[in-house]
Image (tube, rainbow, N blue to C red):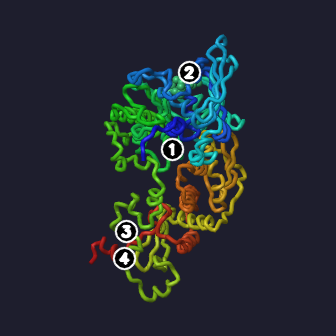
Amino acid sequence: MSIKLLDPQTASKIAAGEVIERPAGVLKELIENSLDAGAKNINIDISKAGKALIRVNDDGCGIKKEELTLAIKRHTTSKITNFDDLNKLNTFGFRGEALYSLAAVSKLKISSCQSEEAGGAMIEAAGGQISAQAAAPAIKGTTIEVKDLFFNTPARLKFLKSDNVERGHLLRTIEEAALANINTAFNVNTDGVSVYRLNAQEDSEQGLRTRLNKILGQELAKNLLFCQDESFGFKAFISPLNNLCASRDNQFFFINKRPVLSKVLQQALYKAYQPYRAKEKHPCAIIFLTLNPAEFDVNIHPQKKDIKFAFESDIFNFIYNKITKTLLQEQQVSQPVLAENFATQQEQFIPEQKEKETDTQENIPLDLSEIINKHLGEQKQDLFINDFEERKEYFTAPHQQEVEPEPELKQKTSNYPKWWQGPYNYLGQIHQSFLVFENPQGLVLVDQHAAQERVLFEKYFKEIQIGNVASQPLMFPISVQMPSSTLEQVLNYKDFLLKIGFEISRFSATCLMVNSVPNILKFKEEDLKDFIVALPQDLKADEANLKYKLVAMRACKRAIKAGEKLNKEQVEALMENLKKCEDALHCPHGRPTILTFTTSEIAKRFERT
Ligand code: ADP
Ligand code: MG
């Protein structure tokens, strides 16, 4: 094959693919251009999740009439002139590629005006070709309209996700921009419905709080702790220890107002919360840093989301210590006991390749196979560190033993599962948690909560599998507040939820209603909310059956079980139900439900021979 120069249209489509992968990428570029232009008001209209239209209107400096055609050419920018300018960059843009890319893969229209005297101008382009030029209203500012995104790149179009998912990404982009730029007012409509109306705020803690209230919802925002420091221009809102969230989505990191993904910052955050955090709870955190542009590199990622720090460990230690101190101060007021657990020494940032060994490993999104292995693995109870772990040598799960049952008993139990070594003579309950039995092998302990969860899980999962989940309308539907971006992600699972017995509906842009729940599950309000909010991150898998299993497991974990104190009938019922389970020996998360302490082991412990 001979080498030839790509024609400009092909080249531009390929280039566009790197800058813009989905509607949210378009919106990000447009908002950043408006902010770079000094806009005080930004109006955003979206229809069909950005697939039909994304329009961003601002009152910024505008583009010169005669430069409109230049603006949509490749590598044309008013923001830098040479490479060294990157070290003093104070704009979001600098590549001069966004408008060029948009013109290549959509029907683009730009109207702009620098001043009333100069008048306005408009330009239209489709698939990289200018299709119209005309005068425009003389209103200072710029309106950029992106229609029919990817109309000429069908493969890209096909790759887009459902409207809920794409809208979720679009709204997240807006939420990030709005949190980082509180001096600017944002007005957001999707398909003609108002989602956010955010007034401009002063640069102060109060200003930030006002904006946070609007975006995260009062319920979450009102309790956040504020901390700041002159170094690194650090400002942060973080969850108090008694108010962590079920969702990992409420974490925002900004460097010089740029939303960033950063393992360093994320690990520092989790490290600070690590001693106090239940496994499925996550801190909400909005962290702002201001750095010298020479100290980090935004140029490593085409969408400029990922960053690299020049002084990784310094940043890590600083964030970790700041957050720890803030939590400690707060904690001293309410629960002095916990204080001693706080580490005050310097902690080391662990670079990526060692990440698996760090304490924060469970915070980094796991892929589903890992979750399944971790939680559902049938013989994997040893993965789990629990109260029994250190005493494991004295306890052995019955299925691991080679004890031959008496022939008579064997016959009697032939209809029973393999593990069943009855009769089980119930002796009582200890610490309202463990049931004590005598059986022919010796002493048997049942973790009542683990056993109840197993029984519940199998019943519920069976209902899901046969497609017959009985659902119960709630007398008082439960409202759940969340950012609009999270809400779209949850709504994406509306039909899925219906199949597993939960009926949800949109109440407003930032509030969902839970109207029905499965008959078989009872929830405390808080636990139900947590279940709903955590859904998108629990459901990353593609495989339907795994999804059902995972979600059933999550639901059962949060559902209320029978009271702490069980009577004899309840105990017997539980054992009967456990007998019918496919994997009675483990709770849905893989921990053992039953431990046997054989008579010979007991004797040995008493040093009898
Ligand atoms: P970059 O932002 O990297 O410079 P873009 O392709 O996004 O590249 O924009 C090209 C140029 O068009 C910008 O440098 C800026 O001068 C002008 N421009 C784009 N959007 C706006 C806007 N909303 N207001 C004013 N000028 C704009
Ligand atoms: Mg730009």
Query: Which disc number belongs to residue 248?
Result: 1
Q: Nearer the viewer, residue 216 or 411?
A: 216
Q: Is mark 1 within 8 Å of ligand 2?
A: no
Relative image position of residue 165 (x, y in whole percent) = 60, 45
Front residue of this view, candidates 50 and 307: 50
Give, as a three-letter code, the residue at label 3: Phe
Q: Earlier in the sequence, mark 1 or mark 2?
A: 2
Q: Amino acid at mark 1?
A: Arg
Task: Give the residue number, with chain letter if any, for mark 2.
Answer: 37
**Distance of mark 1 from mark 4, alpha carbons?**
48 Å
Determine if residue 71 is in view. yes
- Please tell me whether mark 1 sits on a helix, a strand or a loop: loop
| Residue closest to the far front | 2
In the depicted structure, whether residue 421 falls above or below residue 567: below
Label 3 with label 1: CB-CB less than 8 Å: no
Q: Are marks 2 and 3 in contact (CB under 8 Å)?
A: no
Residue denoted by label 4: 599
Q: Which residue is mark 3?
A: 395
Q: Does the residue at mark 1 contact the one at mark 4 (Cβ under 8 Å)?
A: no
The C terminus - image quarter:
bottom left
Q: Which mark is residue 298?
A: none
> Which residue is most to the top?
117
